[in-house]
Image (cartoon, coloured by chain):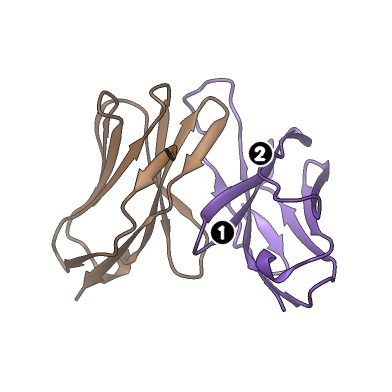
Amino acid sequence: DAGVIQSPRHEVTEMGQEVTLRCKPISGHNSLFWYRQTMMRGLELLIYFNNNVPIDDSGMPEDRFSAKMPNASFSTLKIQPSEPRDSAVYFCASSRRTLLARGPNWRFFGPGTRLTVL
Amino acid sequence: QKEVEQNSGPLSVPEGAIASLNCTYSDRGSQSFFWYRQYSGKSPELIMSIYSNGDKEDGRFTAQLNKASQYVSLLIRDSQPSDSATYLCAVATGNQFYFGTGTSLTVIP
């Protein structure tokens, strides 16, 4: 299994530009998560999808952020316009959600995209 | 109050010693508990999961859970320099999944 795939791995852009991050979850996983990690705030959940449907986007910081999951094997996180405070590592993670509270619902993380907004 | 609390460290132990990492959580209804290891510049990697009170051992790693005290810990025996990383505690309650801010561990050769 290739694991969670993210692209690009690094992105440097100027303030005001549109940034699109991409993710391919592990095949067979039905939940997908976008996280942002900074030194100050740690790992923050931005949004998660279950069966391609957004379930909770309360972590999305502003309207400048949007996420889509058009099918089970692809998701995007878009920032438009980008700002320097958006600089962080963005992780995509996937899991195989079960109906049981206990179960293999742990998150598998992709390698992350390191975003720098100048 | 944060859902998951960890001491940010840094925690330093000599090679061969036992490293003890601690985590507390606020929701008594939490049912699944995880430890992730994150090397600098890398993504979090799941190393342990525990669901029931008591100890769970996997090689040099032991996870301990005490639901009455809302406390979960990770012990690393015979610590190696390669164990130097940030360890994230994660707690799942229903559909919610919370990460702590992580504890930085350095194993000194």
Q: Quadrant of the C terminus of chain B?
A: bottom left
Q: Is residue B57 above or below residue A97?
A: below
Q: Residue furthest front?
A: B1
In the image, the chain rendered in brown is B
The percent coordinates of residue B63 (x first, y second) are 28, 41
Q: Quadrant of the N terminus of chain B?
A: top left
User: First in sequence: mark 1 or mark 2?
Assistant: 2
- Give the chain letter at badge 2: A
Residue A88 shown left or right of residue B107 in the figure: right
Residues at badges 1 and 2 in contact (C-beta under 8 Å)? no
In the rendered image, which residue does mark 1 sit on?
A37
Of residue A109 and residue A39, the one placed in the foreground of this image is A39
Name the amino acid type tagged 1.
Answer: Gln
Q: Is residue B8 above or below residue A85?
A: above
In the rendered image, which residue does mark 2 sit on?
A29
Name the amino acid type tagged 2.
Answer: His
Of residue A87 and residue A100, the one placed in the foreground of this image is A87
The percent coordinates of residue B72 (x first, y second) are 29, 38
Q: Colour of chain A?
A: purple
Of residue A5 and residue B86, the one placed in the foreground of this image is B86
Q: Residue at x 42, y 21 (%)?
A: B29
